[in-house]
Amino acid sequence: MSGQASELRPIVVAANWKMHKLRSEALEYLEDLGTWMDDHPRGLGTRVEVVVAPPFTSLELAVEHRPPHARIYAQTMHQSDQGAFTGEVSPAMLRDLGVDGVLLGHSERRQYFNEHDGALSEKVVAAAEFGLRAMLCVGETLDERQGGRAEDVVRDQLQTALSDLDVIKATSSGLSVAYEPVWAIGTGETATAEIAQGMHATIRDVLGSIFTAEIAERIPVLYGGSVKPANAAELLGQPDIDGALVGGAALEVESFSGIVSAGLDLVAGAGV
Ligand code: PGA
């Protein structure tokens, strides 16, 4: 049942630090993660990709101390390349720092900072234009799930955010999608592998209708929401779950590397 046997998409395991870690703590983490990755080279960077998304204050340091084969992502950005937007950071600035990609539309940005789908569609295009790999986050709230609207909400989020992205750029820009049911983020409550797989299959269908089925097969779709070493193997073993976006369990190298290990084991087991 392992979809990860597919050569078409890597497994992507991403650490979202959110608003955590001073620079000294960031440096210690990056060095420890680098040591761990040096000890586990097989499959890393090719079949299993590691992403670290620190807050802005540690981005430059993370680029300078980037563990081998890891990519560094920002957690958000503005869509304009420059302008009178106090407090914001532009795609040009991220590129200038040597950042590889950017999380877009995380539910905490949508919920607390009014990041809406219209701006997100501009951000997705801007990221591709500036050579930044976008990881678009989507997901329904508990109310929306209980009201039977989960799939419609996620479909709308995808269609609005991705409708302006050039079909060619959909794969060449390194786009990925993270399905993060809001009710599972930071709550200790994980979507069952079955619920997550069902939504991931829907997401792949929607990506197929926005782009083409062939392109949809190449876009990694990650699951996020209380992923930890104990549940990673089951989630990553689902055919349409291509990775994990991890918050709480990514704050320590030991638990984050446990999740990366689950991906490496899966790839080794699939013989690819
Ligand atoms: P969590 O957060 O792993 O702490 O649930 C995931 C996320 O918000 O990206």
Image (spheres, rainbow, N blue to C red):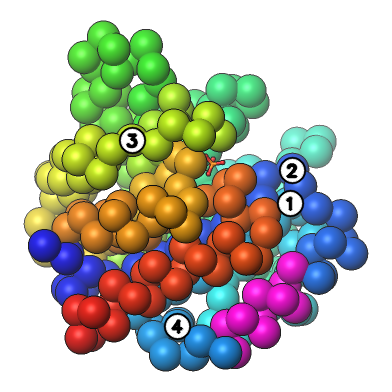
CB atoms of marks 2 and 1 within 8 Å? yes
As helix, strand or loop, the secondary structure at mark 4 comes to loop
Which residue is more in the foreground, 142 or 36? 36
Specify the amino acid type for callout 2. Met
Looking at marks 4 and 3 on the same chain, the residue that comes earlier in the sequence is marked by: 4
Left or right, 48 with reference to 238: right
The 10 Å Cα crowd at callout 3, few under 14, some 14 to 19, many 20 or more, is many
The label nearer to you, 1 versus 3, is 3
The residue to which callout 2 is attached is: 19
Q: Which residues are magenta?
A: 29-38
Q: Earlier in the sequence, mark 2 or mark 4?
A: 2
Identify the mark nearer the N-term, 3 or 2.
Answer: 2
Q: Main secondary structure of the magenta part?
A: helix
Earlier-in-chain disc, 2 versus 1: 2
Q: Label 1 crowding class (10 Å Cα cut-off): few <14, some 14-19, many 20+?
A: many
Q: Is residue 34 above or below residue 214?
A: below
Residue 88, horizontal then vertical, whole percent? 74, 41
Query: Which residue is located at x 49 percent, y 27 percent?
Result: 116
Q: Give the residue type at disc 1.
A: Pro
Q: Quadrant of the C terminus?
A: bottom left
Where is residue 104 drawn, in percent x and y?
A: 51, 45
Residue 3 visible to an observer of this rendering: yes
In the rendered image, which residue does mark 3 sit on? 191
Residue at image location 21% in from the left, 14% down from the top: 148
